[in-house]
Structures are given as structure tokens and as C-alpha cells.
Image (spheres, coloured by chain):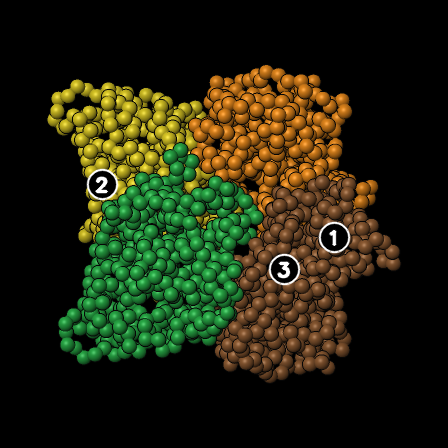
Chain colours: A orange, B yellow, C green, D brown
Amino acid sequence: MPVTTATGRPAPSRGADPAAFCTVRARTEALAAPLGAEDQVVQSMPDCSPTKWHRAHTTWFFEEFVLNRHVAGYRPVDDSYRYLFNSYYEAVGERQPRPRRGLITRPTVDEVAAYRRAIDRSVLDLLGRPGDTAAPLEPEVAALVELGLHHEEQHQELLLMDAKHLLFQNPQHPAYRSDAPDGDADASPTRRGDTAPAGVQGWIPHEGGPVDIGVAAGDPTFSFDNEGPRHTVHLQPFAIADRLVTNGEWQDFIDDGGYRRPELWLSDGWATVNEQGWRAPSYWFGLDDPDGPQVFTLAGPQAVRAADPVVHVSLYEADAFARWAGARLPTEAEWEVVARDRWGADTDGLATAPHPRPGADGSDPQFRGAVWQWTASAYLPFPGFRPAAGAVGEYNGKFMVNQHVLRGGSCATPPGHARPTYRNFFPPAARWPFTGLRLATDA
Amino acid sequence: MPVTTATGRPAPSRGADPAAFCTVRARTEALAAPLGAEDQVVQSMPDCSPTKWHRAHTTWFFEEFVLNRHVAGYRPVDDSYRYLFNSYYEAVGERQPRPRRGLITRPTVDEVAAYRRAIDRSVLDLLGRPGDTAAPLEPEVAALVELGLHHEEQHQELLLMDAKHLLFQNPQHPAYRSDAPDGDADASPTRRGDTAPAGVQGWIPHEGGPVDIGVAAGDPTFSFDNEGPRHTVHLQPFAIADRLVTNGEWQDFIDDGGYRRPELWLSDGWATVNEQGWRAPSYWFGLDDPDGPQVFTLAGPQAVRAADPVVHVSLYEADAFARWAGARLPTEAEWEVVARDRWGADTDGLATAPHPRPGADGSDPQFRGAVWQWTASAYLPFPGFRPAAGAVGEYNGKFMVNQHVLRGGSCATPPGHARPTYRNFFPPAARWPFTGLRLATDA
Amino acid sequence: MPVTTATGRPAPSRGADPAAFCTVRARTEALAAPLGAEDQVVQSMPDCSPTKWHRAHTTWFFEEFVLNRHVAGYRPVDDSYRYLFNSYYEAVGERQPRPRRGLITRPTVDEVAAYRRAIDRSVLDLLGRPGDTAAPLEPEVAALVELGLHHEEQHQELLLMDAKHLLFQNPQHPAYRSDAPDGDADASPTRRGDTAPAGVQGWIPHEGGPVDIGVAAGDPTFSFDNEGPRHTVHLQPFAIADRLVTNGEWQDFIDDGGYRRPELWLSDGWATVNEQGWRAPSYWFGLDDPDGPQVFTLAGPQAVRAADPVVHVSLYEADAFARWAGARLPTEAEWEVVARDRWGADTDGLATAPHPRPGADGSDPQFRGAVWQWTASAYLPFPGFRPAAGAVGEYNGKFMVNQHVLRGGSCATPPGHARPTYRNFFPPAARWPFTGLRLATDA
Amino acid sequence: MPVTTATGRPAPSRGADPAAFCTVRARTEALAAPLGAEDQVVQSMPDCSPTKWHRAHTTWFFEEFVLNRHVAGYRPVDDSYRYLFNSYYEAVGERQPRPRRGLITRPTVDEVAAYRRAIDRSVLDLLGRPGDTAAPLEPEVAALVELGLHHEEQHQELLLMDAKHLLFQNPQHPAYRSDAPDGDADASPTRRGDTAPAGVQGWIPHEGGPVDIGVAAGDPTFSFDNEGPRHTVHLQPFAIADRLVTNGEWQDFIDDGGYRRPELWLSDGWATVNEQGWRAPSYWFGLDDPDGPQVFTLAGPQAVRAADPVVHVSLYEADAFARWAGARLPTEAEWEVVARDRWGADTDGLATAPHPRPGADGSDPQFRGAVWQWTASAYLPFPGFRPAAGAVGEYNGKFMVNQHVLRGGSCATPPGHARPTYRNFFPPAARWPFTGLRLATDA
């Protein structure tokens, strides 16, 4: 999830709230806690970053954009961190090349923890501790703090994605945590053994016509700048599936030769399948075992459960599956107009279960949890898009090429982080994010 | 220009016309004529193909899809050609890998010419010679012949693109032909020395709202399947430039540090600029010469003329230029709704001049000639797109990822080949096609 | 065969002889004659060069080192040829990068032929035509001409190696010439069908002790500088095989799992076997055919004949075979002391037959023909080695690392070109030269 | 230093000595102690291994070859370690690919320490604790233990080489230890600031003729199998430098354009210089600083001291330097016959000083310390070489291609580890070992 940022809006709800700051910051540390120093320093591929780097980079974000720029006389904790922990902000200056982040063994994990504590103290000096009655924070600074919190939440998901990828490289397949959110049926004893079929998939119809999508100017709720402006899109009549595609359905695709039939694939996808030797979603292994394949989760290896949503498939695979199924992927506009009526209230993680129950309000937690859902839409600017001003917004749109939009949220997305308008994006061959799909069809 | 194909419509105008067949086939041979056997066999990069291969592949297309499938008892000229000259049709079978097309020195150029003549005879046996009063061709076969002619016209442009690329690898920079269409001001004595400035660029406004684009089902004119279905798009008010961006403007961009300022570029574009060491459009050389840069054309090296449209720029460069100019690229829908009113009648190549005069009918030849124009639109299926049935349509949509749409036509496009609905497409880093740009802006 | 050069000795036998010059030059043209323009321009891999390039480069050698430097007022045929046809002479200046030699389609094959004729005329003006009674050539110039002839003979073998490699890339496997030297049993009707076994291999013993090898200073016969100085080497008692390893023996190695047993291989060799997927010598194909494998020769595909010497194996394979056979490769000193007594008189190509008969003088033509023989010796300077002075000798020793010495000569080596002291060399993974092996063992 | 191993000889001095075992094992732990968990897990390039891996692999060596094979009923500490910590023993089975050793974050550093302790206990059960009066160890087992100790000493040097390489990747250039052996002038206060010139280099002459080198069969002192058999080599008269090449001399080479003059280089070396952008020895930085370059040492960055031996140069650079100096590299035979008379008694590390004083016995510590010295000799088997029997000797000779021999020892070599006959070896482009040179010349 390459991180897009934007200055927020006049009245940020969390940016001036020290309790919110502490909550988000503590959650990162809690996510890192099951990982030892060895686990936190290694980079398993150029797209991934070490845990230690995520912890330091999210901290640097506050130091660079809030403290350095808005606290008179602020002195950086360590001058080298600006180089080491800048991700891709050209305006901030030179930086450690991304594929070489895993070569930086110092500062150590303990030193990074100390860096986090030091920055936390400085930011809290600015915000006031919970309960303080300090002078109100300037709106611009509060907006930057709020942005930093959303930025850190994005990295919380990246941290899990990257840790999962790293641990899977080990032939021993060690678990991140036995009660990890991924492979989450295990986390809840009441749901263990839940192998009930996912049920027949139905269709949610939509009559098409002009619809408005995206975030309107002036909306007081936080959003990233790539979610706006709100604009009209003309849809043809269509229907969208009422649930995600499952492992069982994916196994049918495999059994029907899905990975060996070029007519199902985009040309670039077919080339990738053959170069990479793909035969199943990422993290599946033991494909030829008589007992059936296993899947590596953050909670360790598990049997593949037919009723669970399939996860860790690329856009190429999602597109081929849809073609095999006689359907297609939804566009992001189609997805959004349906999802916003079924998003429901965020009820603390319920959405992350693989088989969440619809809410009493008609909401469908699979829209906001379980897996990110590939859409047919390339990641491009909405009409009238303008990047936010200043350093944090310098590159808001610079990733808008060669990627596809994903909507929804995953089991690894922090609760409350996503929205119906949220635009996640990855290159079409990416499989290490928590990516799945929902079908659509012309009416 | 990876070639898309589609079975045509019930009443193809050219598919049953032996004179049209002869005209198109002869034009390919005329384009190859300035090239020696050595020039015709070498492949200068994996994206390019040898001239000999283009001549053979377009011939194989008729042999495979028309003769093999619709002439009882047809015996192929050479069984090996099916392997050697298939481009990417998985259903037809295995084929020579694209990056290795240049290793096939036999059949020789003369043998390929003989192959062309043999297939011409067989197809003309089917069509009847000009003036013959034969039984009418079956519509399905006529549609395949017509498709084959449009397919061959696409390869005529590819042949020129690829030959230009090859000749430029030679440090001697030999010309393809002194009166080649590229660098064409030289071809017309009356226009030689035409260094008049291109004139101040103006804007063509459009009020936005719902518009229909694409080819409607049942339209009797030939089109490729990716041009339809016709569908409604909702546009915001916008304006589009009344002419193409020129070399002079591009030189200003260079002089203003355009290739050295990361803030102007998409992230992937900036990485490409640095990896490739781009400092100017492709085919420009002598950048540090006191007399100014030169450009390699099919007619050989020439001084860069400020008033000519810039050509051989990638999407990344076009996008960065537009940002530098305070504008953006048009979407393909914006482009089409304006271009269709200004396309004009095809008057035999006039459009290919760099400074064509507007027609008496208000048409603007720069919409249909000079250079292909990058759009902001990713190459994706139109809503409701269905690939054509059968082998020729097997892969119509399989290139719809990782590419951007270009509209218009170039100096190398065969006269009459393109249309306002024509969707050309290339990856965003491609520079060897005849690619330029026209700016757009929000109203 | 990267070409080493050296200024010759005081009284070159061929350097002042116009008839010798004409003979060598004409032989190159005869070798190129079966190849069309298409065949002569393509480069099939970076180690190979196009036929056209070999023809031009050998010509440039005379132009650069003889005419430019020793003919007052000489004007080059084309100024660009110095860049295009320099191989690796840093002192001469910049040059076309080796892996891009195949991108140079002009000058054409005909223009290269004209270049050859022009240089021939200029050199013959210097040498005098056969029969002329001209002033004697200066010894230094004669030495350079003689060097140029040996240099051209080396390229004659390279031309055949490279043409064979190119033609094998074509799935049609076209022959270079039906009576080509490679696969030569077919060339001689009396030997056709000669499938007699090669006979039991015997051993030629040697008592060891101090021996002198290499070319002594002052030896009037031409040699390359890397063949000297003559020096003493102390050998342990050993024995060397009385014939080359055959295809039949190699098939036994394959059948015994030779390519699948790591304990037989050098570590770098085992890595190469697995990376390249080697299962047999180069040019063997149809390994799983029920009728047995075929081998591609310059005369086209043939059945693998058990009694023929194996050819186109790398040092890695030769070394593994020797280990499998309980033997080892000979050092170059061991090879030379045995071979010089059995070299025999050169009798016009007889040595190139796969089963040459021993001469009446006790000579064994397999020492000087059939295949180049890998030795256990790395290609290093002999003690006291000094590169020749001047431009032609500038880089005589610069290839003396990362290569192994081969001794003997092959079916593609020009008659009379090699000597018992001749040191050919290639990297240990090279398989496109005509390389085989002869075993040795400790006494 | 790819590790060669060999079963030792009948009466190993250290293999049955528990005190020796404890000493060597403890030294490894002491060398790892300054490195944190983060430092110990990362792999900075495919040629390097993590510290943690070295600690585990040397332990596995004892477990696999001593305990598994010679202790009845032995049960491995962890079944996965055989896969994770096998280096290249094909006969032992599949193993973690070398370039991916750095992806294994578990077992942790602490778990590896526990593994070491467990194996130590088991081996000591076999050897008896120091002071024990146990039954004597079988000679075969004692030989394996002795081999394991020499093997571990080799890895002690590798550990330092690899740690140095890793730390240098960090732009902060953190020191391994302020008193590290590398950069060792700092380790001895009396020598700090020792910037006296190295003195004029003299020559040690040798009359040449037949000499015997290598280890004789039956020599009771431990040696690796590649050091024998002892055999006669015939030398030409020569002279060898009486000291190592210094940084000051290397700076002269740089200043004289050494890295920019192709005529000084082997062809492969020149290609490497240009591909890698070499301008100075590895670990030098700040080349354009007005205060002169710095060098990274295990003790951190230091000014380059003119009188110190140059270190971290490749064979290519050593060879080019020698040519520039009008000299050459010695062969390994030349080196050995001179060095064995000047080796002297091992006096605990004195040799590792950059400017050691000659011993009272005429010994010259620079022969056995400071830097490994490139020779002109390719790494090939000595005549009559036979690999040792059994698993540990399975691959003794398998690295004998594409490498050059180095002689001597370095500041990072464990005291007493090397010998005058010791053959170290690396590929010609390697610069991360502690490699320097000593000149030689023909008499």
C-alpha cells in the first residue's frame, strides 16, 4: 500500500486529540511486539520494508512534517534519520534506496523504540497530554498530526503484510502470532472449525445511470486527497456479487485448469504466470499433498478452508478467475455505489471475520473487511484532482499509473481506517497484500 | 502498436474487393523496398520485429485465418511458417518467441517475397481478380479479408517504426529514404524551410455533461472491437488545445530543467528517466552541440525545427510536460468528442504534414495526422465490451492492462486507416512509436 | 577463439608473399559464400559475431596496422569503419560494443565485399602481385602482413563457429553447406557409413621429469607471442590417451547419470549445468527420441555416431567426464610433450577426418585435427612472457585470466594453421567452439 | 574464503584436546559479541553470510560430521538445522540457497547460542573435559574434530569480512569494535600516529631451478588436502619484494591514472572497473575530499595511512598495479619458497601489525600477517592431488576453477591458523577479503 497523503480538512477529529495519538502509536508497537530483533531488521523483497523501518519511518513522518516545521527550535533526534527513514519524499532530500532498507542494522530495534518514545513526548508536548487544558493546536498542525495517524495506520497494515512475507521465506514457516488476525478463525474459539459452506452467491442489481462518487469538497470527515473530488460517473446497468469469491471456488478454478489456459488471461498476466510458475494463490503450499493444500497465515500454516474468502491473489488472477466464471471485476464506481449503502457502522473488528453476519441495519461486513477487492479500474486521478499543497502533498498523485484500484479493507486493516470512498492501489502482479475479489456482471 | 483484431461487420466495403486487397498488399512491399536484406532481418530490440517478419506475418494472417479455414483442401506454403510467423495467437499453437524473431535468417527475404506472391494468388483466386464476375464471397470470409487488410495497415506503421529504430542504432544514422514521411517537410519542396512558428496555442472549450463515445453496434463502417460499444460518459467542463505541443515548447521544458525536476513526474516516470538517462525525446541527439540538437528521421538526421510537433515522447514525458505547462492530458472521451467534429475528409496524406492547414470544412488535420496523441486514459475495456468470436478475436482484449490510450494518427499511419474512435495503445515508457501530445485543462 | 596477436619474427615466410595473401583472403570469401546477406548480418549471442563483421574486421586489421601506419598518404576507405570494425584494440580508440555488432546493417554485405577488394588491392600494391619483381617489403611490414594472415585464419574458424551457432537457432536447422567440414564423414563418400567403433582406448606413457615446452626465442617459424618463451616444466610420470573421447563414451556418461550427479562436477560447473539445463553436448537434440539423439552439424542434422569424437562440450563437462572415467584432463605441458612427436606433416586436411589413420611416420592426426582438446591448465602467461611491442601487441596478454587452454586443432581450423605449441583458450563454460577432450592419468 | 576441508592425518594435535576445542569455540563467540541481533542476521550480498549463520554452520559441522556419524544414538538438536546450516555439501542433501541465508530470522541469535552450547556439551562428552582421564578418542574422530576446528577458524575470518562488509553498507559507517584487528594501529597506543614511511622496497633474489613445494604425505602437522602433494616445480630466476605494497604507492597508482588506463589491465579487469565504477580499493571513501580519502576499518573510518599495506584490492587491481610498477605478481611456488624461510615462529598476533619488525631469527612477519597476497597462480590441483575420502572431503577440489591463489594471512586470520603452504583462494574480482599484494620480477 504505497501511502498517499493529504492535508486534512479544517476540523480534524483526531489530530488534536492526544488520546487518539497515543492509541495509534501504541497499536504499532503492539503489532511489532511479537517480532524479535532479527525479524524486525530483515527485508524479504524490494517491495517490503523491515518492521524496524516501518516503526522508524512513521515516527520520522511526525518529526519531519510536524516537529521540524512547526516547533520553533526543534532539534532532530539524530541527523541521519532524515536520510534513513524518508520513504520517497523527493523534496525532503536524498534517502536510503528502498531495496537496501534491509541493510541498515543500526540504529537497533531498541534505539528505534527510544526514537519513537522521544518523538511521542515531543508531539504530546505539542498536543497536550490527555486531560490537559492547553492552548488549542493550530488547525494546520492538527491536520498534519491527523494525517500522520492515518499514515501510521496504513503502515500498520504494511507491517503485517511484510512480516508475513518474511516469515514465509523461512522453510519452517514460523507463525507471527498464534492469534493473529489473518487466519482469524483460529483467533476466536467459537468460530474454530467453522467449515460451513459460504453459501450460494447472489447478485445485487443496480439500474445504472449517472451516479456521484468520491469525497465532496468540504466534507469534514478525514479522507486522502485521492478520494476526491466528488464527480458524476455514468454507469450501465450491472449487478455485483453479494459476497467474496471463496477458496472453494478458487480450487474449482485450479481444478479446471485455470492456471494453464491462456485464453482466460490478460497477455501480461499469462506471461507472469509462466515466469513465476504460479499454480495457486500466494502462501498456498503443499499443492500436491494428498490431504490438500495448506496456506500460510500470520497464525501459521493451516488447511485451506473452502468457505473462506480467497486472499493473496493478483489482479491478473482475479481477472482470469472472473473470466472463467463468466463474469468480470466491478469498476470502482460500481463498487462504491453499492458498498456505501452496506458499509454499516464500524463495530470493532467484526468485519475482519471471514464469515461476518450481516448487520441488523442491512450492512454487509464483507464490504469493509476480510480482503481488499480488486476492481477493473486503473488507478487514475478523479476529474479535477489537485494534489494537496506543501511537502506532505507533494507527491499525492505520483503513483497514478501502472496500478489498479482496490476497495474495501482487509483483516489487517486497522479498525475504522477505511471508508467506502477509500482507494487502495497496487500493481497488477502484487500478491503479498491481503487481496481478493468480488464478481460483477452486466445486467 | 500491438494489433487488435475483430471480425468486421456484415457488409465489409473492402473485404471482397480484389483491388483494395492488391493496393494494401502492394503498399507493404513498397514500404519494404528501400530496405536491403540485411535491414530486413535484424531485430533491434524485443519490442521491434524485423521487416521480413512483418511481411511474412501479415501474409500468414491471410493464410491461417482465410485460406486454411475457408478454402477446402488448402495446403500451406510451408509448414514451418505457422510456427515462425504467428505473433501471439495462443489458439493457433506454439510460436517463435518474440525476442528471438531476429535470429531467423531463413526463409530469406526473397523467399518471403515469394510467400507473399503465393498467398496473394490464393486470396485473389478466392476474391476474383479486379474486373472478374465471380460468385460473391461469403460475408464471413469477406470480413476476415477486410480484417486482414486493416491488420496489415497496422503492420505498415509498425514496419516504419521498427525500421527507424533499427537504423538509428547504426552510428552512421543512415536514412530509410530521403523522401520518407517522417521528417516530411523535406519531402515537399514547397514546404522546405518552413520554420514559421507554430502560432500561439488556443483552447477549444467543451461544456461537459453526458456524451456518447465509441462505435455503435451495427455501424456498417469497419472498426476494431475495442472501439465499442458506444456508451455514455459524463464529462466535466474542459478545454482542449487547438494544436499539438511543438518541439520549441519541448525545448523550453528541457531548458527549464524538465528532465531534472522530480516534482513534475509520476514516480514510475522519474525512475525511468533516471534509469534510461533521458534528457530529450527519443531520436534527438547532439544535445550539447553548439548548433542545437538534431533529430533522426526516416529521411535521416535533421535539425530540430521548433514549430514541428514533438514526437517520440513517452506517456511519462507527456504527463510531466503537461504538469510543467500547468495543464494535463485529455481523457480519451474528451479527445473523441472534440476530434469527431474536426476530423474532416481524408485527403490523401495532407494530414501528415506537420503544419497542415485547416480544411474549408473547419476540419483540423492535426487531429488525424502528424503524431499519435497520448491520453490520460488507461487502456481498458469499454463497458459491455465483448471480444469477437473465433480465432481472430480470441485475444482482442488481452492487452487491456498496463497501457495507455493514444488517439489520432501519425505521419506513418496509412491514409484512411484511423478514425475518431480509433484506440491505439502503448505502455507508458514507449518512445519508438510516433507519439506526441495535445494539452487539455479543466474549464 | 579470442584472437591473440604478435609481431612475427625477422624472416616471415608468408608476410611478403602475395600468393599466400591471396590464398588466405580468398578462403575467407569462400567460407562466407554459402551464407546469404541475411545470414551474414545477424549476431546470435554476444560471444558471436556476424559473418559480415568477420569479413570486415579482418580487412580492417590490414588497413589499420599495415596501410594506415606504413603507407604514406594512405586514405581510409571509410572513416566509420575504424569504429565499426575494431574488435578490442583500446589504443585504436572507441568501437562498436561487441554485443551490438549485429545491429549494424550497413555497410551491406556487398559493400563489405567491395571493402575487402579495395584493401586487397592496396596490400597487393605493397606486396607486389604474384610474379612481380618489386622492391622487398620491409621486415616489420611483412611481419604485420603475416600476422594479419594468421589473424584472418583464426577468424575463419570463428566464422564457422558463429555461423553454426546462428543456424542452429532456427527451428528448421538449416545446413550451412551439405559438404561442410563439420559432420565431415558425410563429405567423403568413401567414408560415409563409417560407423566402426573407435576402438579400445590405449595409453601413451611418459616418464615425467623436466621438459621444455613453448617456442624458443629466435625460432624462425611464425608463432603467436603467447606460445613463448620456451621454458622448463617439471612433470610427474603420466599417461595420455591415444585417442579422443567419443560420442559413444559420452552417451555412456549420460546414461550413467553424468549430468545429474553433483559429485562429478566442479562447483561452478554444477551451477552452470543446472542454470542452463544441460543434458548433453551442445548441438545435440531430440534427446528423448526413440531413435536416439541427433546432432546439428554444418552439414545439417545427423544421427550421433558413436565412434566420432565428442565435440561442443565445455571444460566443465570435460572435467566431469574425466572424473567419471577415473581419469583427468592433461595439463598443457603434458599434452605438448606427447603431441610434438606425433604431430606429423600437414597433409591438407586429412587430420580433420574423425577417424584419421596414423601416418607412415607414426604421426597421429587426431592430435592436430578433429576437435580442440581441453587441458587442465588455466590460460596464464608462460614464465618470462612479454607482450609484443606496438599496437598489435598492445593486448596480447590481456585475456590471461578466467580461461582454460585448449590444444590441437579442429575440423574447422584452417589447414596448417595450428602447431604443437599453439595455445587456444576459452572460458570454462564455452560450448560453441569445436571442443572435445583426450584423457590423461597419473602413472 | 570458500572453505576447503580434508580429513587430517594420523596424529592430530588438537583434535583430541578439549582445551583446544574450547578455545576455538570461545573465540568465535568473542568475535560475535560486539554484534547485536540485528547485525548478526542480515546478509549484505550473496557472497557474504550472516554472523548468526557462521555461528550455526560451524556448529552444524561438528554435529553432522562428528556427532551424527560417530555417536551411537545421537539425536539432532533440531531437524531443520541440517537444511538451514549446510553450506554446500551435496551429499548431505538439500540446503537453504546461499543468497537467501539472510532471510532466515529464526532460529534467533539466542537460539543459535543455545545450539552452540548444546553441541559443545556433546562434543566435550566425546572428548572429555579438560583434565578428564577418558578413553582416548578414535583417530578418525579426532581428525574430524581437528578439521572442524580449522574449519571454524576459517569462518572466524569470514565472519569479520562479512561483518565489515555489512557495516559499511550503513551510511553511518558504524565500527565493529574500536579496537578491532583491522585498522589495527589504533589497537596499540604505542603505534598510534605511526605515519613513518614504509621504507624503500627491496628485492629478495632467488636463483630459480627445481624446487619442491606443498605438503608431503605423512607430514604430521595439520594441513588441508589442497596443500599437497609435495611436488617439484621448475622456477626461472626471480626476485620478490621484501615488503607489501603500501597505500602510499597505491595512491601514486591512482594519481597516475591507474584506474583510467586500459593498457594496464586484463580485459576482464577493465570491464569490471568500468561496470563497478572502481576508482580506489574497496572501503576507501571521500576520494574527492580535500583532506584526502578515508578508509572504513573494523574500528570505524580512519584516514588512509600511506605506510600501511594496501588492502581490499581485487586480483584485477593487483595485476594492474604490478604492470604499472614494471613488475608482476609472484607465482605461488615463488612465494612459498621464499616465505618458508622467513615465516618465523608464531608470536601471538605480532604479525597482524601493519609494520611488524623482523624477528631476531630473520623472520618477516609480513609474510604471515597483515594481508592475504594475490599470486599469479590460478587455483588448480597440485599434481597427484586426490580429495580426501568421505563426506567432509567430498568436494575438496570442487572450487578449483575461476579463482586465484592467495598466500600469507591477514590481520583477521586467527593466530596460528595459516602456514607457508596454506592456499587461500578467491575469484579475481573479490575485494571484500583482506587482500593485498607483494611484487615480484624476473631476475
Quick check: A273 left or right of A158? left
- For the N terminus of chain A, give its image quadrant: top right
Instruction: Choose between B316 and C134: the one closer to the eye.
Output: C134
Residue at x-position 26% and y-position 74% = C142
Tell me: residue A108, above or below residue D246.
Answer: above
Task: State yes or no: discs 3 and 1 in contact (Cβ < 8 Å).
Answer: no
- Amino acid type of the residue tagged 3 in the rendering: Asp
Label at residue D225: 3
Q: Position of residue D246 (x, y in %)?
A: 60, 76
* Residue C332 shows in this picture: yes
- Marks 2 and 3 in Cβ contact (< 8 Å): no
For label 1, the residue is: D141
Query: Do dots 1 and 2 share one subunit?
Result: no
Determine contact: label 1, label 2, CB under 8 Å. Answer: no
Q: Quadrant of residue A352?
A: top right
Task: Report the disc number at residue B111.
Answer: 2
Q: Which mark is residue A286?
A: none
Q: CA distance from mark 1 to mark 2?
A: 73 Å
Q: CA distance from mark 3 to mark 1?
A: 17 Å
Badge 2 and badge 3 in a common chain = no
Chain label for disc 3: D
Quick one: SS at disc 1?
Answer: helix
Residue A319 vs residue C416: left or right? right
Q: Depth check: give the residue in front, A125 or B230.
A: B230
Q: Chain of mark 2?
A: B
